[in-house]
Image: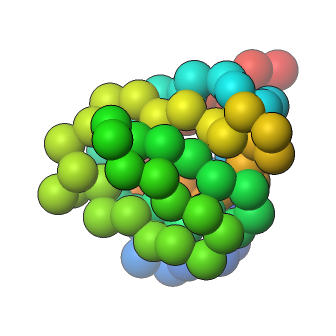
Amino acid sequence: MSAPLRGVSGLGESVHLLRVAPGASFALPDAAELLLVATGAIRVGLSRYAGGDFLDLAEACASHATADARTGCLCLVVGDDELYRTHP
């Protein structure tokens, strides 16, 4: 589930809050620059990131992540474009 956070920046960034079910895989858009794991954990490639960890997506060169199988995750993703399309 993705929800855009409006009005949190005046610099033109797109900011999204992601809630990902335990064990689910999710896309990391090309336009994404930073990811903060707020709660739970994710795996990107062979690396694991837990609550409080930042990931510089520009350096990671990854297109997908997987939420922890037990906890899932809540993440904040910041980029310079519309990262995720919302559905009405």
Location of residue 58 (image quadrant): bottom left
Q: Position of residue 2 (x, y in %)?
A: 72, 39
Q: Residue at x 73, y 49 (%)?
A: 73
**Colour style of the rendered protein structure:** rainbow
> Looking at the image, can residue 3 be seen?
no
Location of residue 56 (image quadrant): bottom left
**Viewport quadrant of the C terminus:** top right
Q: Position of residue 84 (x, y in %)?
A: 55, 34
Location of residue 21 (image quadrant): top right
Relative to 7, does residue 40 appear above or below in the rendering?
A: above
Relative to 11, does residue 18 appear above or below in the rendering?
A: above
Would residue 32 appear left or right of 58 to someone viewing this image?
Answer: right
Q: Position of residue 60 (x, y in %)?
A: 23, 51
Relative to 24, does residue 61 appear above or below in the rendering?
A: below
Q: Residue at x 67, y 24 (%)?
A: 24
In depth, the one of 72 and 56 nearer the eye is 72
**Viewport quadrant of the N terminus:** top right
Q: Residue at x 33, y 37 (%)?
A: 45
Q: Position of residue 4 (x, y in %)?
A: 69, 50
Count up the numbered dots. 0
In depth, the one of 86 and 56 nearer the eye is 56
Would residue 61 appear left or right of 73 to someone viewing this image?
Answer: left
> Looking at the image, can residue 72 be seen?
yes
Q: Residue at x 45, y 71 (%)?
A: 54
Relative to 79, does residue 36 appear above or below in the rendering?
A: below
Would residue 9 appear left or right of 23 to someone viewing this image?
Answer: left
In depth, the one of 73 and 69 nearer the eye is 69
